């Protein structure tokens, strides 16, 4: 956590971090623990993409190429006797491989909460760090409540929550141009889930300089960024090719084609049940409705936040051809895009140019 703080916070804030970071970390850790407990309580695994099959490299290939978290779990598995010895009195159920995944999930949620105030700052808003708790509203609603507790399919995949954290942290490091930190994070994000490409796309949308110049001047002005976009695109493409080739013989062609969203939407109005939701009407409550906040406040948002919401539109368009959009859990990075925009609307104070320069 100390290394994370060093990576994402400016050196000018060291005094503030030293005095207030640990109580904040404790609160974030406790909330992450509560979130993780209910997340694992109300969701279940989908057999072709279970963590056990991913860990043993036998899962269907659309799931099998997302290997990071189970690989970390395999690496940590020899530590289970030590974990049992230290925490067996604390955990009210057997400590096994799933507990390792719970621990990993808890760490990623904690890091996500720590990242949110700084992501808002890079978008041009100052928020109280404890306001980052707000992001748990849409995430809890999508991943726990309508995904499992109330009505949804209740599916759990170990890479879902980490993808949110990698996205937020990746955008921060991209915007700060801390490439020595960024590329290890980006590499891990690509091994976690192919949607890591939105880190690159988001960094480009937020960081590109457009000042009504000609195309040639535009290329010159953004030469460094174009270089990093090319490098990141190559990293993403090479890793996808390697993973797809490595697991080419795994079954899973069925999962490459998304189910009909039109059929699902029609059931909202007819009241017929669907495998994704017993009552499809719950679908209209996605993100706990917080998406309406940046929509209503759109004109009051600054330019960077509007650009970030533009990335959300691109994300939705790609989901229409790549995902089962009727599942509440598929809107991974979109939770962060909408969440931080709503966070800025509710709790944010715009940073003036003079404040930006002094920071």
Image (cartoon, rainbow, N blue to C red):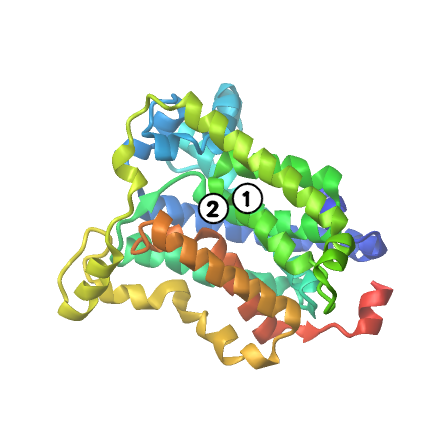
Q: Classify 10 Å Cα crowding around label 2: few (below 14), some (14-19), many (20 and above).
A: many
Whether tag 1 and tag 2 are in contact, CB under 8 A, the answer is yes
> What residue is drawn where x is 39% and y is 48%?
39
- Which of disc 2 and disc 1 is earlier in sequence? 1
Left or right of residue 218: residue 138: left
Residue 100 picture location, percent across and down: 47, 32
User: SS of the residue at dot 1?
Assistant: helix
The residue identified by callout 1 is: 108
Residue 161: mark in rendering = 2
x and y, in percent, of residue 44 in the image:
30, 41
- Tell me if 51 is positioned left or right of 67 in this view: left
Q: Is residue 30 above or below residue 267?
A: above
Q: Residues within 10 Å of mark 1 (few under 14, many from 20)?
A: many
Give the Cα separation between the discs numbered 1 and 2: 7 Å
Quadrant where the C terminus is found in the figure: bottom right
Residue beneath the point at 17% across and 64% down:
267
Say what secondary structure mark 2 lies in: helix
Q: What residue lies at 53% left-to-right and 60% top-to-bottom? A: 311
Please state the horizontal and vertical placement of residue 228, each as a whole percent of the image: 69, 43
Is residue 203 positioned above or below 97 on the image?
below
């Amino acid at each position: 956590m100390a290394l994370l703080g060093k990576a994402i916070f400016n050196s000018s804030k060291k005094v503030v971090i030293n005095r207030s970071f640990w109580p904040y970390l404790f609160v974030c850790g406790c909330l992450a623990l509560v979130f993780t407990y209910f997340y694992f309580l109300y969701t279940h695994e989908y057999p072709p993409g279970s963590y056990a099959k991913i860990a043993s490299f036998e899962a269907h290939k659309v799931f099998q190429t997302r290997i990071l978290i189970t690989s970390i779990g395999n690496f940590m598995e020899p530590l289970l006797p030590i974990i049992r010895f230290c925490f067996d009195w604390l955990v009210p159920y057997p400590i096994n491989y799933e507990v390792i995944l719970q621990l990993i999930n808890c760490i990623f949620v904690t890091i996500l909460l720590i990242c949110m105030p700084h992501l808002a700052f890079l978008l041009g808003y100052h928020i109280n760090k404890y306001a980052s708790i707000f992001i748990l509203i849409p995430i809890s609603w999508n991943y726990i409540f309508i995904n499992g507790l109330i009505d949804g399919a209740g599916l759990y995949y170990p890479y879902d929550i980490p993808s949110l954290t990698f996205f937020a942290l990746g955008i921060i490091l991209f915007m700060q141009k801390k490439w020595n930190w960024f590329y290890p994070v980006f590499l891990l994000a690509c091994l976690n889930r192919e949607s890591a490409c939105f880190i690159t796309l988001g960094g480009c949308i937020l960081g590109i300089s457009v000042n009504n110049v000609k195309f040639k001047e535009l290329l010159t002005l953004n030469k460094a960024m174009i270089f990093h976009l090319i490098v990141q695109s190559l990293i993403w493409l090479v890793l996808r090719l390697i993973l797809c080739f490595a697991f080419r013989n795994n079954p899973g062609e069925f999962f490459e084609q998304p189910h009909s969203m039109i059929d699902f939407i029609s059931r909202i109005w007819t009241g017929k049940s669907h495998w994704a939701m017993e009552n499809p009407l719950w679908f209209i409550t996605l993100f706990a409705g917080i998406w309406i906040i940046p929509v209503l406040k759109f004109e009051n948002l600054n330019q960077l936040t509007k650009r970030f919401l533009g990335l959300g539109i691109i994300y939705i368009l790609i989901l229409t051809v790549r995902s089962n959009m009727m599942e509440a859990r598929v809107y991974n990075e979109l939770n962060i895009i909408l969440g931080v925009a709503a966070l800025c609307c509710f709790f944010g104070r715009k940073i003036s140019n003079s404040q930006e320069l002094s920071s």
